Image: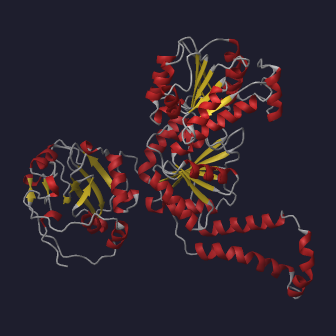
């Protein structure tokens, strides 16, 4: 491996490298720096997060710009405020011996006037988020017409976050003869489009394979029922007492909920998501960097730019909608040559997605078992013993030793040790002694096969579909959320144009039908009814895949049920729906949870056969008579 001196860096930059303690360049630095120093060329560099990409473009930019000039010559775009600040601080550290260097960070959430003032003082390099940069260009607070070098860092994430238009507008205002350096962990089509539009015959370097995960991270998965996901998370945390981790959730709501539950259960946790104010995010990140927070629960977008040393674990509490996102998640650990572990908690219905991730990252996941209670008790006990063994003795305790020795005068060494550790051991033993086994085996990797029904499944018709913005996954998430069910409790979801079908076990039937009595989604009544799954000839047997689905719509079940002025809803052959659920601010979740334990209601009236048995409506909620209070 080369040294930084052999790469061709000048003395001022080598001094900065020595101050930072860098010894040898990483692979991406070894490949990129000589090209960028010696050639005026565009470059596409594909490398996993945490491999030293900032230095790979930072050192060449610092060496090639004219420090004596106050003109802005370098522009670095990054997806988030945190990453923007991180890059700016690193660039300043790299160039600490370059007299007159001014690197300015431009990002939202801070005073635009102060940032404009810093730029006006003469910023040779600007590091910016696309949104704020575009705003400052529009206000004519920055001049990018003399840019010589532009960098798109984490390009895939910027495009995933919807910055394509902003990036296009910004780069369109820069000189055509500039050099553009694009750094990304993955190479989706959108990134290729940007490269073709704004780059001229770029050179390409790849560290590992495209989208491949770094070799310093091991990948594990734990298969549990969806309803046990949170319990599995707690056990994984308890089985790793020194865990310092980032936990990824798919939505802001789930992120906040998981963090709150962890805090309530006594864990050192915090949430990081887009609904937090910038000040709140700064506080959370400061606490995490100082290790006041041991488990940071985050969304994918909010976690961009987290550059914290020694993260031991990344836990995928939920897999992302975008399979490529896993590469970014796992890159939070195993950085700077250190090892890390990426854990995935999955249900059986998610195994196919796990296989897809394996193909993308070119790594195999190892199936591990969620530890049982006694294993956790043993780990915690030995962890406590090790901490005590390594504790430095305080001389301040000497004045209390006489009283302490008197108290334990008749206690043997063995008994004293037992007493001391029993306090810690008992806490975990009492919690876990009757804990169940959370692990499940087998699975089905179908499109949405989910849990295989025990033969007592209920199949439902629902009058929302793709025209309402759903696909099968979004509809499944919606049903899981509003019904307060586990992910595996909703299965065989089949989303059509204006209506859909889904299954639950019959034990949830009352709960499902009770909830969707006069329920509105975005101002529209949602109708859910029981249907019998009878596949049509030539159909796929998925409750409406064939021609039967169309005939049912004509019967009045799939049409638009909007009513001007919120009038009463009627379905074909059904009685008038009376009673309206209150649309106030009351907590519906309590009513939903309570419905599980509600007594069995009287049998519904038969709604009759529809469409000559193609779809037999055995029970119609809308056809029931009004309940008596």
Q: Is 538 or 175 nearer to us in this picture?
A: 175
Q: In this picture, is 22 found above or below 63? A: below
Q: Is residue 619 visible?
A: no
Indicate the quadrant where residue 411 lies.
Answer: bottom right
Q: For the point 79% across and 24% down, which residue is it? A: 99
Residue 573 in percent (x, y) is at 7, 60
Q: For the point 64% across and 66% down, which residue is it? A: 376
Q: In this picture, is 510 found above or below 471? A: below
Residue 277 in percent (x, y) is at 53, 50
Q: Quadrant of the C terminus?
A: bottom left
Q: Is 455 or 172 nearer to us in this picture?
A: 172
Residue 139 in percent (x, y) is at 49, 28
Looking at the picture, the colour scheme in use is secondary structure
Q: Is residue 503 left or right of residue 388?
A: left
Q: For the point 70% across and 17% down, which residue is it? A: 69
Q: In this picture, is 577 found above or below 420? A: above
Q: Is residue 265 left or right of residue 542?
A: right
Q: Is 585 or 10 nearer to us in this picture?
A: 585
Q: Is residue 84 left or right of residue 599?
A: right
Q: Is residue 262 left or right of residue 244?
A: left
Q: Quadrant of the N terminus?
A: top right
- Residue lying at the far bottom of the rendered structure: 410
Residue 68 in percent (x, y) is at 74, 17
Q: Is residue 432 visible?
A: yes
């Amino acid at each position: 491996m080369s040294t930084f001196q052999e790469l061709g860096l000048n003395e001022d930059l080598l001094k900065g490298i020595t101050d930072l303690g860098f010894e040898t360049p990483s692979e991406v630095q070894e490949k990129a720096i000589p090209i960028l120093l010696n050639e005026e060329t565009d470059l596409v560099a594909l490398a996993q997060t945490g491999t030293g990409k900032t230095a790979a473009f930072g050192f060449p930019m610092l060496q090639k710009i004219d420090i004596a000039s106050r003109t802005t010559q370098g522009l670095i775009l990054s997806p988030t405020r945190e990453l923007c600040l991180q890059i700016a601080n690193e660039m300043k550290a790299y160039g600490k011996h370059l007299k007159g260097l001014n690197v300015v960070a431009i990002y939202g959430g801070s005073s635009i006037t102060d940032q404009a003032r810093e730029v006006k003082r003469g910023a040779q390099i600007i590091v910016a988020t696309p949104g704020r940069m575009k705003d400052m260009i529009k206000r004519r607070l920055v001049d990018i017409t003399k840019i010589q070098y532009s960098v798109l860092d984490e390009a895939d994430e910027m495009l995933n976050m919807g910055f394509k238009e902003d990036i296009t507008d910004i780069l369109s205002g820069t000189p055509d003869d500039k050099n553009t350096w694009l750094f990304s962990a993955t190479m989706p089509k959108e990134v290729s489009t940007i490269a073709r539009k704004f780059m001229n015959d770029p050179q390409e370097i790849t560290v590992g394979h495209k989208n491949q995960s770094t070799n310093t991270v091991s990948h594990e998965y734990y298969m549990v029922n969806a309803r046990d996901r949170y319990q599995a998370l707690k056990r994984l945390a308890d089985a790793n007492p020194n865990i310092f981790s980032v936990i990824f959730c798919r939505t802001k709501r789930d992120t906040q909920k998981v963090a709150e539950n962890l805090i309530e259960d006594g864990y050192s946790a915090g949430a990081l998501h887009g609904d937090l104010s910038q000040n709140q995010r700064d506080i959370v990140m400061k606490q995490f960097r100082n290790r006041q927070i041991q488990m940071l629960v985050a969304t994918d977008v909010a976690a961009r730019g987290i550059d914290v040393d020694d993260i031991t674990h990344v836990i995928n509490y939920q897999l992302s909608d975008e399979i490529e996102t896993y590469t970014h998640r796992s890159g939070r650990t195993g950085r700077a040559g250190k090892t890390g572990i990426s854990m995935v908690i999955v249900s059986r219905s998610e195994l196919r997605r796990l296989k897809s991730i394996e193909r993308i990252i070119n790594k195999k996941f190892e199936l591990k078992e969620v530890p049982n209670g006694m294993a956790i008790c043993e780990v915690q006990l030995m962890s406590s013993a090790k901490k005590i063994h390594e504790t430095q003795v305080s001389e301040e305790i000497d004045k209390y030793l006489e009283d302490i020795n008197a108290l334990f005068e008749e206690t043997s060494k063995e008994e004293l040790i037992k007493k001391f550790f029993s306090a810690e051991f008992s806490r975990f033993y009492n919690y876990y002694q009757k804990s169940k086994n959370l692990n499940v085996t087998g699975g089905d990797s179908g499109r949405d096969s989910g849990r295989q029904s025990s033969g007592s499944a209920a199949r439902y018709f629902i009058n929302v579909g793709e025209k309402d913005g759903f696909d099968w996954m979004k509809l499944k998430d919606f049903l899981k959320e509003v019904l307060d069910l586990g992910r595996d409790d909703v299965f065989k979801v089949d989303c059509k144009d204006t209506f859909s079908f889904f299954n639950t076990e019959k034990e949830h039937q009352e709960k499902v039908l009770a909830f969707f009595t006069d329920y509105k989604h975005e101002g529209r009544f949602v109708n859910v009814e029981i249907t019998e799954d009878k596949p049509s000839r030539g159909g796929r047997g998925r409750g409406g895949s064939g021609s039967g689905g169309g005939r049912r719509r004509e019967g009045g079940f799939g049409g638009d049920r909007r009513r001007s002025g919120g009038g009463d809803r009627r379905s074909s052959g059904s009685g008038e729906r009376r009673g309206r659920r209150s649309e106030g601010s009351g907590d519906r979740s309590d009513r939903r949870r309570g419905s599980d334990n509600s007594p069995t209601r009287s049998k519904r009236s038969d709604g009759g056969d529809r469409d000559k048995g193609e779809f037999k409506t055995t029970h119609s909620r809308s056809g029931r008579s009004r309940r008596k209070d």
